[in-house]
Image: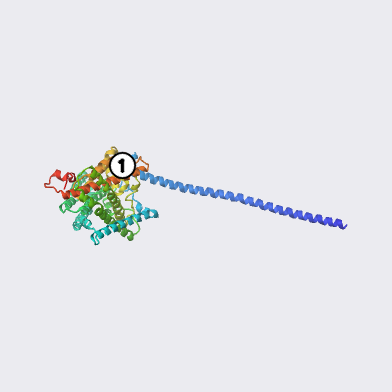
């Protein structure tokens, strides 16, 4: 009996254990099933999140690509008008044409990169070493501290004459074009004979421009025999005022003729005054402005400009004057000419790079900052150019824009969109004449080296080394030609300068004035 009860208890205990084991298994299976269910739900949720992320990124990427395509098309349209068949060749109003927008100069953007900033510091250190070595050698040779500023003071001599002549040019450019525009604009729509009125005003204004902005600066330079740098300042300001006044009238007169401007809507004197000082040659009634002036940035750019001027002074004193002063004593032959050209390549390269940085970057950015002028694209990455056509477009954007909109496009409009090559040649020819005119007045003699290099070789290079060449090797070719070209210009102009000093004319004749003296001068 006891064995039966014991067996029954064991059976009951076994069943309880089995039931407990079954419950545990069921719980574990339920937990595993729940875990699997959670994984499935989490996977579905992640699929939804992934789809949303992909959709958002796709939308943002589409917007970025659309913006990039739009910017590229605008840039392509601006820089490659010849390849766009349906481009309007004449501005419909003053709001079209060049588009101004707030943007920093490219060198300023590159200065944010530490590697490029280090390269800039290396050039600054090289400048310091150059000055220190020059001063040290002169001190050892002469036993005292010698600072050669004679060339600097000579080149920028007669400052008072430059100041009062510039003041006359500025007052004329400020008042006469502005008053003539308002006189003509207020009467054009009411006049019974608008053509006669316009012809009379154009004739009077043309005579005034020719006398004041044409003859007067030339007379000042020749009559007072201004030194090179002072002559260059007067000549450049003459050209700048001519281009500024033309742009002012070119942008406003068509809108008056089309009756898009009422007499009350003519430009204000304050807008025109601002335009005369801001670093652009394309007139607008208003420009994008920066919120405030960074005076430390202004001081920095003016300091860098002065440093560049002194660097050029040291370059000429140490690398040019000692060589070309004595070169006139040697017979002129191929060997002498080749050696002098390659000797002038280094200082010529210094002159090219330093002039670019001083004028197109430091000087223009300093005035842009003081006037809160926001569009600082005075140049593009011309140093990366693989063609001369791209180099001409990107070297000096300020001048290029004026020539492009007011010479190239207007000639195409007059020719009914034909003769694109002729329009381009006209631009080259005009630019070469102005460059040679400035150099002739500044140096005091006619020697058309710049004209030949610009109007002949520049045109040939523009056709043959063009935008179809994309290999990086062509950038090397471009820099090689630039170095050699700078050497040729510096060598020939310096030789002619000293030849005219050592071999003055005994009798002034026309052919004696225009014939290079360096070809025949021997002492």
Q: Residue furthest right?
A: 1
Q: Nearest the camera: 248 or 253?
A: 248
Q: Residue furthest left?
A: 507
Q: Position of residue 488 (x, y in %)?
A: 25, 45
Would you say residue 223 is visible in this rendering?
A: yes
Give the colouring mode of the picture.
rainbow
Q: Position of residue 392 (x, y in %)?
A: 30, 45
Instruction: Report whether 52 appears left or right of 379.
Output: right
Q: Nearest the camera: 498 or 94?
A: 498
Q: Nearest the camera: 373 or 196?
A: 373
Which quadrant would the N terminus be assigned to in this image?
bottom right
> Looking at the image, which residue is at 15% across and 45% down?
513
Would you say residue 91 is visible in this rendering?
A: no
Q: Secondary structure at mark 1?
A: loop
Give the quadrant of residue 479. Answer: top left
Instruction: Report whether 59 appears left or right of 223.
Output: right
User: Label 1 belongs to which residue?
Assistant: 89
Q: Position of residue 429 (x, y in %)?
A: 24, 42
């Amino acid at each position: 009996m006891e064995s039966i009860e014991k067996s029954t208890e064991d059976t009951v205990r076994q069943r309880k254990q089995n039931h407990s084991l079954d419950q545990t298994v069921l719980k574990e299976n339920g937990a595993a099933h729940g875990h699997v269910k959670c994984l499935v739900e989490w996977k579905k949720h992640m699929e939804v999140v992934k789809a949303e992320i992909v959709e958002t990124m796709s939308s943002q990427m589409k917007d970025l690509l659309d913006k990039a395509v739009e910017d590229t098309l605008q840039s392509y349209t601006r820089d490659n008008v010849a390849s766009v068949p349906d481009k309007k060749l004449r501005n419909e109003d003053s709001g079209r044409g060049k588009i101004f927008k707030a943007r920093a100069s490219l060198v300023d953007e590159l200065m944010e990169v530490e590697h490029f900033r280090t390269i800039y510091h290396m050039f600054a250190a090289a400048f310091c070493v150059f000055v220190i070595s020059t001063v040290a050698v002169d001190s050892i040779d002469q036993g005292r501290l010698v600072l050669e500023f004679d060339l600097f003071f000579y080149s920028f001599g007669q400052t008072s004459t430059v100041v009062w002549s510039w003041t006359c040019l500025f007052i004329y450019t400020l008042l006469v074009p502005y008053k003539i525009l308002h006189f003509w604009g207020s009467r054009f729509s009411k006049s019974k004979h608008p053509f006669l009125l316009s012809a009379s005003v154009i004739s009077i204004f043309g005579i005034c421009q020719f006398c004041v902005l044409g003859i007067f600066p030339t007379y000042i330079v020749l009559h007072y025999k201004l030194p090179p740098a002072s002559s260059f300042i007067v000549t450049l300001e003459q050209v700048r005022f001519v281009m500024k006044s033309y742009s002012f009238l070119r942008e406003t007169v068509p809108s008056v003729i089309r009756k898009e401007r009422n007499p009350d809507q003519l430009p204000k004197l304050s807008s025109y005054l601002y335009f005369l000082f801001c670093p652009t040659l394309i007139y607008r009634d208003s420009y994008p402005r920066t919120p405030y002036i960074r005076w430390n940035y202004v001081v920095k750019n003016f300091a860098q400009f002065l440093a560049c001027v002194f660097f050029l002074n040291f370059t000429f004193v140490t690398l040019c004057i000692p060589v070309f002063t004595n070169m006139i004593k040697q017979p002129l032959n191929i060997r002498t000419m080749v050696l002098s050209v390659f000797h002038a390549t280094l200082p010529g390269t210094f002159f090219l790079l330093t002039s670019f940085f001083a004028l197109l970057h430091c000087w223009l950015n300093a005035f842009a900052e003081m006037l809160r002028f926001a569009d600082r694209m005075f140049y593009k990455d011309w140093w990366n150019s693989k063609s001369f056509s791209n180099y001409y477009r990107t070297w000096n954007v300020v001048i290029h824009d004026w020539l492009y909109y007011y010479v190239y496009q207007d000639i195409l409009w007059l020719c009914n969109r034909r003769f694109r090559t002729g329009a381009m040649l006209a631009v080259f020819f005009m630019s070469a004449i102005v460059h040679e005119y400035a150099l002739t007045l500044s140096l005091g003699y006619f020697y058309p080296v710049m004209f030949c290099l610009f109007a002949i070789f520049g045109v040939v290079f523009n056709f043959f080394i063009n935008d179809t060449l994309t290999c990086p090797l062509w950038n090397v070719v471009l820099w090689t030609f630039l170095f050699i070209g700078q050497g040729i210009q510096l060598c020939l102009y310096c030789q002619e300068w000293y030849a005219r000093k050592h071999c003055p004319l005994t009798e002034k004749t026309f052919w004696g004035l225009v014939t290079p003296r360096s070809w025949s001068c021997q002492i």
